[in-house]
Amino acid sequence: MTMFTRCTHCEATFRVTLEQLQTSSGQVRCGVCQNVFDAFVALSASDPRNGTEPLAMEPVPAPAVAEGLPPRLEEPAEQVLDLELTANDQLPREPDLVVEAEYEPPRAIVEERPAAPPPVRHDIAPPREPERTSLLLVASAVLLLVTLALQGLFTFRAEVAAAVPESRPMLEAACVQLGCDVPLPRLADRLSIEASDLQALDASRPGRVVLSATIRNRATTLQAWPMLELTLTNSRDQVAARKVFTPEEYLDGADTSRGLAANGEAAIRLRLDTGDIIAAGYRIYLFHP
């Protein structure tokens, strides 16, 4: 009679017969997990998946001992029936109890954790050695700056002397060595004629006249003497004669290198011979060449 038993370890189900179980006293070895168990413990006469109750099994009587055997006959060694699963013996089971041809023992459940990202490596650049500036390069740069400053000072020496009067003696001393001069500022727009007069020296000689005038420097700095332009006009206010006089001429040979003092005045007196020109009027104009 075909019956069913189940492995107590892996719960694999096998078809067995009572004759097979009696030969091994119910001791069988699972063909899946190799576990030895008592087949009578889970022995059932019905399909394990059916809902019917298993058939009640009557105990199997032990085989009679034949007469005539020696009274102290040793019991045979306990036999174990090896059970092997076949395609016909294997029964369909619940999804959690399915026995496959190749059994894989249950693995321990290990919680899968996300792999930690690899550590980020920040490459640190090696410290740079301080750049060594060439001493020759520094000296060349300083020399160029000094040369540029001296060139600017030479070009604008007049302006520097006008802006800083205290620097004039030093600039003039340097120009003596260089063969140059430090010209005085020329601010003609800051010059004016305060008073002027043209009179004949002798009534019998009308061509002999004298020009008297006062020149005023309204600038706050010393400046060069200007050129003086005298224009004689006739009775119709037309130009009868015109002449330009240098500072040496209208100052009668005085030293003109000192210039006209700031906010200063200077009186000039110029003797003229107009010849046959009878002057009815005159005009004076100051300018720098």
Image (cartoon, rainbow, N blue to C red):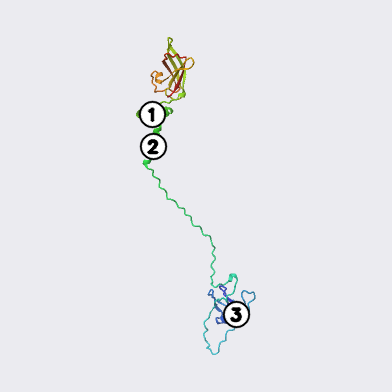
The residue positioned farthest toward the bottom in the image shown: 68
CB contact under 8 Å: marks 2 and 1: no
Q: Quadrant of residue 67?
A: bottom right
Secondary structure beneath dot 2 equals: helix
The residue carrying pointer 3 sits among few (fewer than 14), some (14 to 19) or many (20 or more) residues within 10 Å by Cα, namely few
Who's the residue at 38% across and 41% down the image?
137
Precedes in sequence: disc 1 or disc 3: 3
Residue 39, horizontal then vertical, whole percent = 57, 77
Q: Quadrant of the N terminus?
A: bottom right
Q: Does residue 119 lie above or below 183 as drawn?
A: below
Identity, as a three-letter code, of the amino acid under mark 1: Leu
User: Is label 3 in contact with label 2 (beta carbons under 8 Å)?
Assistant: no
- The residue to which callout 3 is attached is 2
Kind of residue at disc 3: Thr
* Residue at 37% from the left image edge and 39% from the top image edge: 140
Horizontal and vertical percent for residue 3? 60, 79
Residue lying farthest to the right in this orientation: 52
Secondary structure at badge 3 equals strand
Q: Which residue is mark 2?
A: 144
Of marks 3 and 2, which one's residue comes earlier in the chain? 3
Residue assigned mark 1:
171
Q: Name the kind of residue labelled 2 in the image.
A: Leu
Foreground mark, 1 or 3, reads 1
Dot 1 crowding, Cα within 10 Å, few <14, some 14–19, many 20+: some
- Residue at left offset 40%, top offset 31%: 155
Q: Earlier in the sequence, mark 2 or mark 1?
A: 2
Q: In front here: 79 or 265?
A: 265
Q: Is residue 64 left or right of residue 271?
A: right
The alpha-carbon separation of the residues under discs 3 and 2 comes to 118 Å
